[in-house]
Amino acid sequence: MKRGRPSTAHLSIVSPDTSGTRPSLTPLRPLKPDEKVFFDVLISEHAHLRRGDVPLIMGLARASAGLFKPDITVEEFEKLSRICMSYSTRLRITPQARTHPTTLGRRYADQHTGPKPWDRIRDEADNDDEDK
């Protein structure tokens, strides 16, 4: 064990256990083919999902597959879409769940490309000085 405070260079090194691959995630029970497609896409697209998330992923896959059935009623569609949104938020795969509000606010504040309000006032004051 090294003595003293760790250097910045030492802290920036990624440890080997965090760079490894995650174990393969499999459903707890067999899924229908269309549900399995949703399950596989969710697993491949979102690397932060872990084994403990498998029941929620299964529920989301089943609800998502149910949305695409041709004989679904409006009430069933509404229920399934609410279930999908609930599971997606809990699994942190929706944009609102992945982004911290402060970060999102800063991102929108940084996007402003037009003149700042205080720049207009300064330009008007400069024009008034030139007229005199």
Image (cartoon, rainbow, N blue to C red):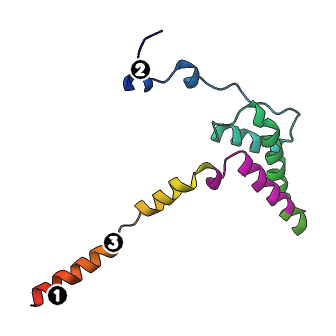
Q: Nearer the viewer, mark 1 or mark 2?
A: 2
What residue is pinned by disc 2?
5
Q: Which residue, given by chain and number where applicable, does mark 3 sit on?
A: 116
Q: Does the magenta stretch include residue 22?
A: no
Kind of residue indicated by mark 3: Lys
Dot 2 falls on a residue whose secondary structure is loop
Disc nearer the start of the sequence (1/2): 2
Q: Nearer the viewer, mark 3 or mark 1?
A: 1
Front residue of 103/73: it is 103
Which of the numbered marks, if any, corresponds to residue 128? 1
Q: Is mark 3 on a helix, strand or loop?
A: loop
Answer above or below: position of 82 versus 12: below
| Residue 117 shows up from this direction | yes
Left or right for 128, reference 84? left
Above or below — where is 40 with respect to 102? Answer: above
Question: Could you tell me how far apart the alpha carbons at marks 1 and 2 are, in whole angstroms?
Answer: 58 Å
Q: Nearer the viewer, residue 114 or 119?
A: 119
Q: Which residue is drawn at 52% across and 21% down?
A: 15
Q: In this view, does 116 lie above or below 26?
A: below
The magenta region covers 79-97
